[in-house]
């Protein structure tokens, strides 16, 4: 977008104030500044305005205004995506949903879904369910509690039930979305009826899955104003086990085998250095005799016997891997592990919560990807070498998703923003190259990563992508600049 | 990268501001009570934009330090429209959590030194210069109180009255004096000046060391080993800020609730009367931020309430580390009086919904603002300080 003239800026501001009320519009530089960058090394860009919508009509009005004036719109909830996704690449209007458009509109007990406005956070949803629907649960990611639940679902985030149920993107039953010209469309089973009804958001299929035109598009094809997410029955017993493992391939094989056993809710592996970070060692190094990974394995059960049976199966998996690799894995109960390592590790289990190593410094960046499970061992080993090369403590985070159909591979760097950013970015570039070489697909990918990814993908996919984007956003107002388009 | 020159700021402010370069990813955890998931930030809840939450202020500080932001008149609003209640520090889980209020106060000193304090808050400094108190009342050396209560020049305890109690909430002051006498505490009062709290909270530090040294000198003359105050602001200042600004207070600092609990715990001490002596049966308790969020002193007031036979405490949903500010602190009562009342109004309504007949606090400034909001709302709640209840019950 060309820089706004003073006259144009003044005109747009007046119209925005008419839509949202003056107190919900700002163009003051100090108000805009906090929206101009995030925790990552992604290049900062200032928005021209920030607005705080409360109602769908206001979103429709601002989309129409943007469409008329060619001013970009950037949806924003918490800005916690670790991908620069809410940095206004080309300026424009940041639409901050988290402050006023954050209602939990409906929880359907029997169909087990919640209809959320875009500003709802995980902490808010957790409290609402605990207070009003104690028989239901949502799942929570490895993220602070006030991250956006809808944003995370729309970007296919993972969570603490991912081994059983996969990505949050798969759990969306439907959305209400404002298209580039202000049209409001409902996608999913909620398309039944002329008006919004809270009782028909139960499924996503079997109609053509138009949701795919919005999930993972980073706000480039429409602005979501309602989203129905699947909930799950809360089981009477929720607990966790902790494994430790020596050897990268041993760890990866253990994860794959645990996934295939189909008795766990989730499995996440972190470099052993991370456990040390959790108990307050800011830049830990691994001692050669120490294990390479710690694994957190949340498990839920209906009865004590159910749990015992699951634990027996889990122990059998560990035994099987040990027979093959020579006693390189160990399992214990989470409470035992916490008492040995320190209570700080509870943050990894007690979600939504703050995983303290992630908030240690002013910068946080990652190469986060969906990964082929069979390559995880190699990825762990080579990522470890990159961490050492750039002198950052190893922080690999990995999961097995949906029983092992795919995995998650993340290399995370915490850094000091004003002194370590260049080094962190150079390491990220190597992680990207490593990941793509081994079949990883970056998710919540920042602009620089998408640009590099283009060199590795089917050109016709890119052509199709551009055509869909052109169709959905002919004036280029919806979070422009993402994916370099 | 170019950095702003902050060498003219106080040493504590320089240290606090340097933290913003290396800390805070803006994870938003500061915005709501941790694990309670309830709103606790009056500024953010009122003004909404990111610049009005702790993490946004840290970003503003970083912008000013790295010269990406320039000083303007406008920028003073997010910097000063904050009660510095410290709820953010109780929610934050990052290493800088205990320094967030320090960072905001340092940012205010940076603002004052760069473009001056906002006009209303600047008045505090002028009033303290002229009258030794921020209310503009004629200074009292407290000789009249010493005479009335037959207090000697030396004693084991100094009751530091504080300006709000001495010039605005005299019932609270008189109740404290009465309780101390009823409990047989060997105490006196001194020729005190403003403790410095309103100036520290608004970044106006020039007078602060002098005020602290004066008060320390007056306390030392009495030979006391303990200084007790019923003002949460004075308590926080003497407990933490004196040392921060290099002035050793040299005595134990107690809030009245701590001292009264201690005295009532002694064998042979008279017992409190049924119902607080004045029919207050169901009460709710408001945690003053300077006692709670700032110091972590949550239980002594509750312990004291529990000592009053027949008084039932009904907690508000937001209590202790999740408590909601009264709206007066951080220079907000003078700087943004209407907003201060709105914040207090939310607290008064929360208190009303508990069904309690009495809203109890332990800070004269909280009492002032909650009373103002209560009068405006007409809830019928009785707003009292805990020491007043104790005085009735003794």
Image: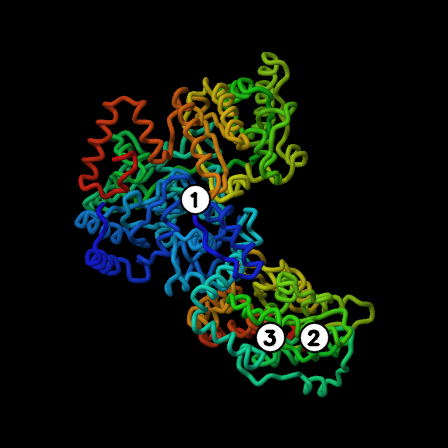
Q: Secondary structure at mark 1?
A: loop
Q: Is residue A419 left or right of residue A212?
A: right
What's the coloring here? rainbow
Of residues A292 and B289, the one nearer the viewer is A292
Both marks 2 and 1 on one chain = no
Q: Work out whether residue B145 can be spotted.
A: yes
Residue A58 placement (x, y as % from top left)? 26, 53
Both marks 3 and 2 on one chain = yes
Mark 2 to mark 1: distance in Å?
Answer: 47 Å
Read off the chain for label 1.
A
Up the image or down, B40 lies above or below A412; here it is below
Mark 3 to mark 2: distance in Å?
Answer: 14 Å
Q: Give the number of the disc on residue B328.
A: none
Read off the chain for label 2.
B
Read off the chain for label 3.
B
Q: Are marks 2 and 1 in contact (CB under 8 Å)?
A: no
Dot 3, crowdedness within 10 Å: few (<14), some or many (≥20)? many
The residue sitting at 56% across, 54% down in the picture is: B15
Of residues A267 and B353, the one nearer the viewer is A267
Mark 3 or 2 closer to N-term?
A: 2
Q: Quadrant of residue B322?
A: bottom right
Q: Give the number of the disc on residue B194.
A: 3
Of residues B350 and B154, the one nearer the viewer is B154
Label 1, on which residue?
A147
Residue A136 placement (x, y as % from top left)? 46, 40
Work out which residue is located at the far top of the displayed protein and give it: A324
Q: Nearer the viewer, mark 3 or mark 2?
A: 3
Label 2, on which residue?
B159
Q: Secondary structure at mark 3?
A: loop
């Amino acid at each position: 977008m060309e820089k706004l003239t003073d006259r144009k800026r003044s005109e747009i501001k007046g119209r925005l104030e008419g839509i949202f009320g003056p107190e919900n519009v700002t163009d003051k530089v100090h108000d805009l500044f906090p929206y101009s960058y995030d925790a990552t090394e992604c290049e900062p860009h200032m928005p021209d305005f920030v607005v705080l919508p409360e109602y769908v009509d206001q979103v429709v009005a601002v989309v129409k205004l943007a469409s008329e004036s060619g001013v970009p719109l950037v949806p924003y909830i918490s800005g916690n995506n670790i991908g620069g996704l809410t940095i206004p690449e080309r300026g424009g209007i940041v639409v901050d949903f988290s402050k006023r458009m954050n209602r939990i509109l409906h929880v359907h007990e029997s169909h087990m879904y919640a209809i959320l406005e875009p500003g709802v956070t995980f902490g808010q949803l957790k409290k609402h369910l605990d207070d009003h629907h104690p028989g239901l649960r949502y799942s929570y990611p490895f993220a602070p509690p006030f991250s956006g639940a809808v944003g995370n679902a729309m970007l296919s985030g993972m969570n603490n039930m991912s081994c059983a149920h996969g990505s949050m993107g798969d759990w969306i039953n439907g959305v209400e979305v404002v298209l580039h010209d202000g049209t409001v469309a409902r996608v999913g089973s909620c398309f039944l009826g002329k008006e919004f009804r809270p009782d028909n958001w139960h499924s996503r299929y079997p109609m053509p899955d138009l949701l795919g035109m919005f999930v993972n598009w980073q706000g480039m094809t429409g602005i979501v104003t309602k989203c129905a997410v699947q909930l799950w029955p809360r089981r009477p017993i929720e607990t966790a086990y902790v494994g430790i493992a020596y050897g990268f391939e041993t760890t990866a094989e253990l994860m794959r085998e645990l996934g295939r056993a189909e008795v766990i809710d989730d499995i996440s592996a972190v470099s052993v250095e991370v456990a040390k970070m959790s108990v307050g060692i800011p830049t830990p190094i691994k001692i050669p005799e120490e294990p390479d990974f710690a694994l957190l394995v949340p498990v839920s059960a209906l009865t004590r016997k159910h749990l015992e049976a699951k634990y027996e199966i889990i122990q059998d998996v560990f035994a099987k891997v040990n027979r093959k690799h020579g006693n390189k894995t160990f399992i214990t109960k989470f409470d035992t592990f916490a008492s040995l390592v320190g209570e700080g590790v509870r943050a990894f289990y007690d979600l939504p919560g703050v995983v303290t190593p992630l908030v240690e410094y002013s910068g946080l960046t990652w190469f986060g990807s969906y990964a082929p499970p069979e390559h995880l061992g190699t990825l762990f080993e080579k990522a470890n070498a990159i961490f050492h090369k750039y002198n950052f403590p190893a922080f690999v985070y990995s999961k097995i998703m949906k029983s092992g159909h795919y995995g998650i591979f993340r290399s995370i760097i915490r850094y000091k923003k004003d002194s370590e950013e260049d080094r962190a970015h150079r390491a990220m570039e190597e992680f990207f190259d490593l990941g793509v070489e081994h079949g990883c697909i970056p998710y919540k990918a920042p602009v620089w990563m998408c640009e590099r990814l283009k060199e590795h993908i089917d050109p016709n996919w890119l052509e199709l992508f551009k055509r869909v984007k052109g169709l959905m956003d002919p004036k280029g107002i919806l979070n422009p600049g993402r994916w370099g388009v | 990268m170019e950095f702003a020159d902050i060498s003219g700021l106080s040493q504590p402010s320089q240290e606090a501001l340097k933290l913003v370069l290396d800390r805070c990813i803006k994870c938003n955890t500061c915005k709501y009570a941790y694990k309670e998931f309830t709103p606790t930030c009056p500024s953010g809840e009122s003004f909404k934009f990111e610049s009005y939450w702790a993490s946004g202020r840290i970003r503003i500080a970083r912008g000013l330090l790295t010269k990406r932001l320039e000083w303007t008149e406008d920028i003073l609003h997010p910097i000063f429209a904050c009660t510095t209640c410290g709820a953010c520090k109780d929610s934050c889980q990052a290493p800088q959590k205990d320094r967030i209020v320090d960072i905001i106060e340092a940012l205010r000193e940076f603002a004052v030194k760069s473009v001056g304090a906002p006009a209303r808050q600047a008045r505090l400094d002028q009033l303290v210069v002229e009258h030794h108190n921020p209310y503009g009342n004629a200074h009292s050396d407290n000789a009249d109180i010493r005479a009335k209560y037959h207090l000697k020049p030396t004693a084991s305890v100094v009751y530091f009255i504080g300006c709000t109690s001495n010039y605005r909430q005299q019932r609270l002051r008189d109740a404290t004096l009465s309780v101390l006498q009823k409990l047989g505490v060997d105490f006196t009062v001194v020729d005190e000046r403003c403790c410095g709290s309103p100036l520290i909270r608004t970044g106006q530090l020039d007078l602060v060391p002098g005020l602290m040294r004066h008060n320390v000198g007056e306390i030392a003359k009495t030979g006391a080993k303990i200084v007790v105050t019923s003002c949460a602001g004075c308590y926080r200042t003497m407990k933490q800020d004196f040392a921060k600004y290099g002035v050793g207070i040299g005595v134990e600092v107690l809030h009245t609730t701590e001292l009264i609990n201690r005295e009532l715990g002694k064998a042979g001490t008279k017992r409190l009367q049924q119902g607080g002596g004045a029919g207050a049966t169901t009460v709710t308790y408001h945690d003053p931020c300077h006692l709670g969020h700032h110091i972590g002193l949550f239980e002594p007031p509750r312990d004291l309430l529990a000592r009053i036979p027949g008084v039932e405490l009904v907690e508000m949903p937001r209590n202790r580390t999740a408590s909601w500010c009264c709206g007066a602190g951080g220079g907000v009562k003078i700087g943004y009086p209407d907003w201060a009342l709105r914040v207090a109004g939310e607290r008064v309504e929360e208190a009303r919904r508990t069904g309690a007949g009495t809203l109890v606090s332990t800070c004269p400034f909280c009492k002032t603002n909650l009373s103002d909001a209560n009068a405006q709302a007409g809830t019928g709640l009785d707003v009292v300080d805990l020491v007043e209840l104790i005085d009735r019950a003794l």
